[in-house]
Amino acid sequence: MGYDGREFFGNHASVAVGSRAGGYIVEHAAFVEFVLHLGESELPLCAGERQSLAMLAAVPHALLDDEAQFGEGWRVIPPTAQSDWPVLETTPGRLRQALETARTVLWRHAGPVGITAGDLIAVEGEIDAVLACLQRAEVAGVPVSVSYVA
């Protein structure tokens, strides 16, 4: 960590969060680096924070990952056809908890993580938008799926 994410991911990344109740596409590359990969940092985190962030780190790259994985309350479903892609499937509440954990960790450790103020504000806005999507899924009682492309 410690860079703005553009060095590796370029200026574009898309994180797709979807359910039968609707979806949202995150379009800010910093979200991938500073939310999905936050658990890979060497920050001093408690076990619960590490567990929440591990789920976010398991969100598969739609074009690269194709192996099944699972954790407490989530699983990665590999593609079933050539035109399919892997997704992480979980409950809206579990994903909400993980995103709120990531938000808290980012604010508490912004300096050591190396996130810029502009990227932190952009990531905040994206988290809020995803949380609104998750609320719709939670009301509908349906699971959500997540994958990304960078």
Image (tube, helix red, strand yellow):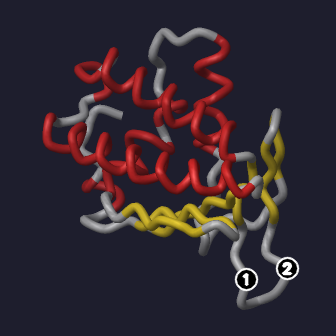
Under mark 2, the amino acid is Thr
Between the residue at mark 2 and the residue at mark 1, the CA separation in whole angstroms equals 6 Å
- Quarter containing the N terminus: top left
Q: Secondary structure at mark 1?
A: loop
Question: Where on the picture, by quarter, is residue 84?
Answer: bottom right
Type of residue at label 1? Asp
Crowding near pointer 1: few (<14 within 10 Å), some, many (20+)? few
Quick one: 64 or 101, which is closer to the camera? 101
Q: Is residue 77 above or below residue 85?
A: above
Question: Where in the figure is residue 29, as x and y percent of width and height?
Answer: 33, 57
Residue 83 sits above or below residue 87 on the image: below
Q: Of the numbered discs in the image, which one, if any, rests on residue 92?
A: none
Image point (53%, 32%), residue name? 40
Quadrant in which residue 137 is drawn: bottom right
Residue hosting label 1: 84
Instruction: Give left or right: position of 92 versus 11.
Output: right
Mark 2 vs 1: CB contact within 8 A: yes
Q: Is residue 94 left or right of residue 25?
A: right
Considering the numbered disc 2 on the image, is that residue within a helix, a strand or a loop?
A: loop
Residue under label 2: 80
Q: Nearer the viewer, residue 91 or 2?
A: 91
Q: Residues within 10 Å of mark 2 (few under 14, many from 20)?
A: few
Image location of residue 67, percent across then percent down: 80, 61
Residue shown at 40% from the left, 30% from the top: 103
